[in-house]
Image (tube, coloured by chain):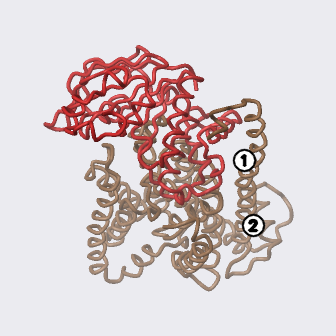
Chain colours: A red, B brown
């Protein structure tokens, strides 16, 4: 992946019909940072990501990638710089894992001539890095949900770019794979300088794996900073309505 | 994953290079198939022009072709009737079958990929019913119009097909994102409505019933140079443009949202792909009526062989679709004139079923 890209949200708001899901969000993620958005269901985490990846209609405010408003770049140039790990994907046709991972190279390959050797090497390295190389020839539709999640992560790693965006990348993973994905993100961040912006529901996992957390509630940023400052028993009680003594790793 | 976390970049690259060999093998398979397909197409074309229910000796056929197409000036050893059969009947006929086979197979591959539905075929957006209604109306109207050597039937069939797609697209809000299911359902609804019109036309048609029926089953019996001269450029141009959009179809494999993340301008590409597929389908049905099965089955057979990569699927579907229809038409005219749509179904369905059975583990509809 290429050196990290910075992201800036300036006064970003979003409404679905009459329901406002984001209010005037200001958030800056510096190049090479690793940031996790947390918050209860409906807090606006995924909506905020949607404003960044371009799937939110009617967004207010500005989103800047490396200081340039998103609207000024073509979809293709955006795709070369930021990779999005999709949530659940469905395949209509039998597709081998290496073909799925290869889709990540589409923004880089020649529109008519197709992938070059450098693209294929990127695919193989991404599969090895995420640990799905042994699945390369399998039909992606026969894999378990967790394996599929790793495959689409490998696709995003193959896509490269200075910004990696993940929405709930660990929901279907067992404990070992959760930990391994988190170390992979740390490794991409440390070794390649990739900026990582993720949404996680698992508070203990987020606290252990990210140096900076951003807590959202009702479409606003409630707290922003190192895990120990953001996650306090009082905040967990206020935002999640749960007594933090019962949440392992927090109380 | 442990290799990735404690990486030795050198060894990683060595493994990558070793595995590249296997990739190359997989990549070469479509090339072999394409070569085989082109040979098959050539053989079908030769068979299609040499064989028929009026026997013309193969050497005479070749001499006629050499004489007329290459300007060869040998002695004329054939009858004028033989020359007419080869030049005015068989040659336009096999070329039409080739064009229609290419067009329908490509349109099917595009619509299956775009709508992400394995059951989609070129007619799924109402093209078939639109064309059929246009043709039925043309047969009911007692006037003869001819533009550029085309009959009213071809003009109305072509227009009807495009109008039907346009209607489906507008009614389903096809221009906005995330409405592919509604495109499919609207296509089905509009198709059913138009089918009622066709039924009415058939009921009112009296003596023309057989002609409408023949159109519904598809046939190359009326192929002529005039039709081909208008139809072929349309199908050819549409097909070439479809072949250049392989990357878009690949991006759409994981759905429109992922396609967007992979850098595709989804709305624009959807419009382009729908337009191209509809244009090619409309030209095909205007040339030959409603030939079923090619557009549904050929892309699937190709995918079973080489996987879903549109870069391989599209050219292979074009070549095998063309060969399939040229051969099916040959079978259709040997015993007299059987509508070719019957042949494509009779030959294609069992073949497809046997493939599905064999590849059940890796392929499901």
The part of the image, by quadrant, that contains residue B44 is bottom right
The CA distance from mark 2 to mark 1 is: 31 Å
Q: Can residue B353 be seen in this view?
A: yes
Which element is circle 1 on?
Answer: helix
What residue is shown with label 1? B23
Q: Nearer the viewer, residue B181 or B201?
A: B181
Q: Mark 2 lies on which chain?
A: B
What residue is shown with label 2? B43
Q: Which of A154 and B160 is in front in this view?
A: A154
Q: Nearer the viewer, residue B221 or B111?
A: B111
The residue depicted at 43 percent of the width and 38 percent of the height is B260
Q: Mark 1 or mark 2, which is nearer the start of the sequence?
A: 1
Q: Is residue B263 left or right of residue B3?
A: left
Q: In this view, does A180 lie above or below B22?
A: above
Residue B171 at what x, y percent from top left?
25, 52
Q: In this view, does B286 lie above or below A12?
A: below
* Residue B303: numbered disc: none
Q: Residue furthest top?
A: A67
Q: Residues within 10 Å of mark 1 (few under 14, many from 20)?
A: some
The residue depicted at 58 percent of the width and 32 percent of the height is A108
Q: Can residue A114 be seen in this view?
A: no
Q: Is residue B27 above or below residue B354?
A: above
């Amino acid at each position: 992946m290429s050196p990290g890209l910075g992201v800036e949200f300036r006064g970003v708001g979003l409404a679905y019909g009459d329901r406002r899901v984001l209010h005037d969000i200001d958030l800056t993620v510096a190049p090479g940072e690793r940031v996790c958005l947390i918050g209860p269901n409906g807090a606006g985490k995924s909506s905020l990501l949607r404003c960044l990846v371009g799937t939110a209609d009617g967004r207010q405010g500005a989103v800047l990638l490396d200081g340039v408003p998103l609207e000024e770049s073509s979809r293709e140039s955006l795709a070369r710089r930021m990779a999005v790990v999709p949530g659940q994907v469905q395949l209509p046709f039998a597709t081998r894992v290496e073909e799925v991972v290869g889709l990540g190279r589409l923004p880089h390959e020649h529109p008519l001539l197709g992938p070059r050797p450098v693209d294929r090497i990127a695919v193989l390295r991404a599969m090895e890095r995420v640990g799905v190389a042994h699945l390369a020839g399998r039909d992606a539709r026969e894999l378990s949900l967790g394996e599929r999640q790793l495959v689409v992560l490998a696709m995003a790693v193959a896509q490269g770019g200075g910004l990696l965006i993940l929405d709930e990348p660990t929901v279907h993973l067992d404990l070992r794979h959760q930990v391994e994905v988190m170390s992979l993100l740390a490794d991409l961040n440390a070794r390649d300088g990739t900026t990582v912006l993720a949404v996680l529901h698992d508070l203990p996992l987020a606290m252990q794996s990210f140096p900076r957390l951003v807590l959202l509630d009702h479409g606003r940023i409630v707290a922003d900073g190192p895990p120990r400052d953001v996650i306090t028993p009082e905040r967990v009680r206020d935002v999640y309505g749960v007594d933090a003594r019962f949440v392992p790793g927090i109380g | 994953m442990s290799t990735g976390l404690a990486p030795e970049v050198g060894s990683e690259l060595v493994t990558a290079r070793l595995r590249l060999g296997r990739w190359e093998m997989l990549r070469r398979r479509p090339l072999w198939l394409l070569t085989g397909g082109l040979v098959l197409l050539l053989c079908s074309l030769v068979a299609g022009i040499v064989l028929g229910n009026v026997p013309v000796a193969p050497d005479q056929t070749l001499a006629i072709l050499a004489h007329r197409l290459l300007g060869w000036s040998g002695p004329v050893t054939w009858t004028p009737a033989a020359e007419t059969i080869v030049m005015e009947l068989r040659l336009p006929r096999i070329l039409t079958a080739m064009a229609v086979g290419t067009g329908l197979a490509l349109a099917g591959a595009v619509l299956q990929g775009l709508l992400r539905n394995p059951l989609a075929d070129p007619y799924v957006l109402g093209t078939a019913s639109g064309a059929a209604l246009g043709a039925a109306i043309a047969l009911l109207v007692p006037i003869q119009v001819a533009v550029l050597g085309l009959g009213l039937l071809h003009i109305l069939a072509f227009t009807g097909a495009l109008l039907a797609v346009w209607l489906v697209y507008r009614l389903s809000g096809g221009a906005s994102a995330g409405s592919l299911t509604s495109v499919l359902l609207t296509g089905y609804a509009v198709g059913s409505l138009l089918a009622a019109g066709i039924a009415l036309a058939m009921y009112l048609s009296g003596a023309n019933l057989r002609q409408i029926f023949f159109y519904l089953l598809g046939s190359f019996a009326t192929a002529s140079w005039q039709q081909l001269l208008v139809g072929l450029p349309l199908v050819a141009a549409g097909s070439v443009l479809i072949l250049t959009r392989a990357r878009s179809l690949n991006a759409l494999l994981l759905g429109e949202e992922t396609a967007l993340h992979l850098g595709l301008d989804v709305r624009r590409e959807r419009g382009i792909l729908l337009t191209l597929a509809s244009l090619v389908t409309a030209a095909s049905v205007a040339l030959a009526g409603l030939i079923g099965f090619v557009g549904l089955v050929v892309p699937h057979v190709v995918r079973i062989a080489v996987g879903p990569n549109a870069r391989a699927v599209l050219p292979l579907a074009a070549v095998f679709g063309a060969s399939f229809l040229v051969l099916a038409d040959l079978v259709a005219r040997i015993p007299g004139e059987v509508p070719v749509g019957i042949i494509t179904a009779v030959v294609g369905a069992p073949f497809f079923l046997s493939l599905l059975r064999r590849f059940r583990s890796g392929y499901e509809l």
